[in-house]
Image: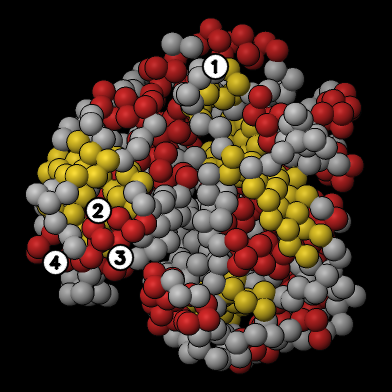
């Protein structure tokens, strides 16, 4: 995984609560067997009409937000299906940071496996940033968001921060504990299936 | 201080623990299906890794399999490729696969318990959010993403931060348990605590309202824990649990000694403390019908579609979400639920496609015909459920009533196979999600129990099944 670096772009405001992963990537696009190329399916049913023309009112179709790497949205983002395709689509489209007042559990943990930083902020701050979208610099090292007019700190678990900053391969880390796993297996009471 | 059941299972699965860091948790059972696994196996290949414990891993095909005649070729080439990929991956890595022609094939959360793969006190994962279903057996079972699927394949473990504990007590007794079902209990819970009410927690369901339930009903409740935001929901195992898992295909040889251990240990201590609690009284609850685009947007069958002001309680975001939901659903506030006409009925999914669900629904439609305006479909949860129903003659009751009787799979719950709604079609569905487009782009889903779906199929609109004689 690539190391997470400082980014500075305008934020894309998607002002809606409870956005589920079926909206982020509709199911007709889950049949691919690769991880790449999902960006074009991001929010597909909201972005395109039945003739695959861009829908005018949808925020991702607004030129102002082209090139944005920061999505700001309503609480409980990423609820529903566990599909990691949702995170692959956001990343492939270009988003590296998602800001919300809360995230669904599985989606939240999927983000860190793919170099996306989910930032949890107070709902009032999220609303303000959503209604007045501006250019923000995201500095994970110092845990700050800053613009010309403000500077906001955010909390993040130190272990998760390290994973993103160092672009760590989770599995390689875990396999270092192989002896401990073998030891555990010797005393486990749960028999194998086969 | 005592421990909760969840804490006991957690503690007995910790492999590595470091303060202020996630713990490395051992995984006893890994269920794999065709949609969320191809990229995980690919990752193993790229890094030259193997599957650590193929004998703890079981695979099946459920999400995109056709539910029509299995002898016919699969028309959707991308689905066919995904199924072939799973076949190849299971062969290459030595994993037992129940493919489309296996008598054990079915929705992964239906076959796990049926085959005795699901065990109390175990940790179970699958690349599917409804893995919470297995919690009905007192297992810690939860959905994971594809990267975590790869991690479990390679290491049989996961790094996890310990979630909070949440007790949901269900008190009282239903007056008519044939009309007011486990589905109505869980929809009532979600309606009350909201779709993120359980986020960050593991739910333990307790109380008379839960212990009274059959194993299959408990599965319906635990299945939809994720719809309340909880990654897992569980029920302490009891004699019903132990009886259900006895003499299944993969029931362990030393089962009775395991039962002895579970009986002693798998319960929440009386002096344990939960981080959060909620109580639902079910003496007077009604059959539930969802009216919106998330499972929390639900009301009693006797009520009307709510007004935005009443529903949102002053919260502007909720109000906006509701207005959008009603626009999508093409519903006007104040419309009685029983006046909503439907085009389709789907009885199926990991929530409600087990034998008891089919038996209960068949009682409603016996010797009757569905409405001329409705197309209705039954998709059994597994080939074993299908066979059992056919041996009981239940398939005949459905087909006589003009329901389509299908092969097992996830089908129209998520519409990855050809079973989908057309734009604008309205469906009474026994599945778990009413999200926009879930059952087909532009399709409108109302979540209900199997008996409510069956009754709606007959009448062409929702009816209060408490008025029917279901005994």
Give the label, 3 or 1, closer to the camera: 3
Quadrant of residue B89 in the image? top left
- The vertical placement of A67 against B10, above or below, is below
Query: Given contact means CB atoms under 8 Å apart, are the residues at marks 4 and 1 in contact?
Result: no
- The vertical placement of B167 against B47, above or below, is below
Quick one: SS at disc 3? Answer: loop
| Most foreground residue, B394 or A79 | A79
Q: Which chain carries label 3?
A: A
**Residue appearing at x 73%, y 50% in the figure:** B205
Point out which mark residue A62 bears: 4
Give me the C-alpha separation between circle 2 and circle 4. Answer: 14 Å
Give me the C-alpha separation between circle 4 and circle 3. Answer: 14 Å
Q: Which chain carries label 2?
A: A
Query: Given contact means CB atoms under 8 Å apart, are the residues at marks 4 and 3 in contact?
Result: no
Residue marked by disc 2: A71
**Residue appearing at x 72%, y 24% in the figure:** A190
Disc nearer the start of the sequence (4/3)? 3
Point out which mark residue B16 bears: 1
Percent position of residue B341, x then y: 57, 89
For the residue carrying disc 1, how many other residues have a C-alpha within 10 Å: few (<14), some (14-19), or many (20+)?
some
For the residue carrying disc 3, how many other residues have a C-alpha within 10 Å: few (<14), some (14-19), or many (20+)?
some
Quadrant of residue B234 in the image? top right
Residue marked by disc 3: A15
Give me the C-alpha separation between circle 4 and circle 1. Answer: 48 Å
Quick one: SS at disc 2? Answer: strand
**Both on one chain, marks 2 and 3?**
yes
**Both on one chain, marks 2 and 4?**
yes
């Amino acid at each position: 995984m690539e190391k997470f670096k400082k980014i500075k772009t305008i934020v894309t405001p998607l002002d809606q609560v409870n956005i589920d992963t079926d909206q982020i990537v509709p199911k007709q696009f889950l049949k691919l067997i690769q991880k790449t190329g999902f960006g074009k399916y991001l929010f597909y049913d909201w972005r395109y009409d039945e003739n695959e023309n861009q829908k005018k009112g949808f925020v991702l179709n607004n030129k102002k937000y082209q090139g944005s790497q920061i999505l700001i949205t309503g609480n409980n983002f990423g609820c529903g299906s566990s599909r990691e395709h949702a995170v692959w689509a956001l990343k492939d489209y270009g988003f590296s940071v998602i800001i919300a007042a809360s995230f669904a559990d599985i989606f939240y943990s999927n983000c860190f496996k793919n170099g996306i930083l989910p930032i949890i902020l107070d709902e009032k701050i999220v609303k303000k940033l959503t209604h007045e979208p501006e250019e923000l610099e995201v500095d994970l090292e110092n845990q700050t968001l800053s613009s010309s007019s403000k500077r906001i700190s955010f909390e993040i678990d130190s272990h998760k921060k390290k994973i993103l900053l160092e672009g760590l391969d989770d599995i390689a880390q875990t396999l270092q504990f192989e002896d401990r796993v073998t030891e555990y297996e010797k005393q486990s009471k749960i028999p194998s299936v086969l | 201080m005592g421990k909760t059941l969840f804490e006991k299972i957690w503690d007995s699965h910790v492999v590595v623990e470091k303060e202020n860091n996630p713990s490395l948790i051992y995984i006893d059972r890994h269920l794999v299906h065709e949609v969320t696994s191809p990229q995980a196996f690919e990752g193993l290949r790229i890094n030259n890794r193997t599957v650590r414990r193929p004998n703890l891993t079981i695979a099946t095909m459920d999400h995109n399999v056709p539910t029509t005649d299995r002898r016919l070729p699969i028309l959707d080439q991308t689905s066919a490729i995904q199924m072939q990929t799973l076949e190849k991956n299971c062969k290459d890595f030595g994993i037992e696969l129940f493919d489309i022609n296996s008598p054990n094939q079915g929705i992964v959360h239906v076959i796990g318990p049926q085959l005795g793969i699901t065990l109390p006190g175990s940790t179970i994962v699958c690349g599917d959010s409804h893995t919470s279903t297995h919690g009905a057996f007192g297992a810690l079972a939860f959905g994971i993403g594809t990267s975590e699927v790869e991690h479990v394949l390679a290491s049989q473990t996961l790094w996890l931060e310990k979630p909070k504990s949440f007790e949901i007590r269900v008190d009282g007794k239903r007056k008519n348990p044939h009309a007011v079902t486990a589905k109505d209990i869980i929809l009532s819970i979600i309606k009350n605590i909201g779709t993120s009410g359980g986020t960050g927690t593991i739910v333990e369901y307790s109380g008379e309202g839960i212990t009274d339930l059959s194993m299959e009903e408990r599965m319906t409740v635990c299945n939809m824990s994720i719809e309340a935001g909880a990654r897992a929901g569980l029920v302490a195992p009891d004699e019903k649990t132990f009886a259900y898992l006895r003499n299944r295909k993969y029931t362990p040889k030393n089962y009775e000694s395991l039962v002895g251990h579970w009986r002693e240990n798998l319960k929440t201590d009386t002096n344990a403390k939960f981080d959060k609690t909620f109580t639902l009284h079910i003496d007077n609850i009604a059959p539930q019908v969802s009216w919106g685009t998330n499972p929390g947007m639900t009301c009693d069958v006797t009520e009307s579609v709510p007004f935005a002001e009443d529903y949102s309680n002053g919260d502007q975001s909720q109000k906006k979400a509701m207005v959008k939901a009603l626009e999508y659903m093409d519903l006007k506030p104040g419309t009685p639920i029983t006046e909503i006409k439907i085009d389709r009925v789907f009885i199926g999914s990991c929530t409600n496609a087990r034998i008891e669900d089919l038996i209960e629904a068949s009682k409603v439609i016996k010797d009757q015909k569905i409405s001329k305006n409705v197309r209705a479909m039954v998709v059994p949860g597994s080939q074993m459920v299908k066979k059992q129903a056919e041996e009981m003659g239940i398939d005949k009751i459905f087909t006589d009533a003009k329901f389509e009787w299908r092969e097992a799979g996830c089908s129209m719950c998520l519409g990855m196979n050809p079973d989908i709604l057309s734009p604008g079609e309205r469906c009474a569905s026994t599945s778990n999600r009413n999200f926009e487009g879930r059952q087909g782009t532009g399709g409108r889903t109302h979540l209900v129990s199997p008996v409510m779906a069956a009754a709606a199929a007959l009448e062409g609109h929702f009816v209060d099944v408490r008025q029917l004689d279901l005994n």
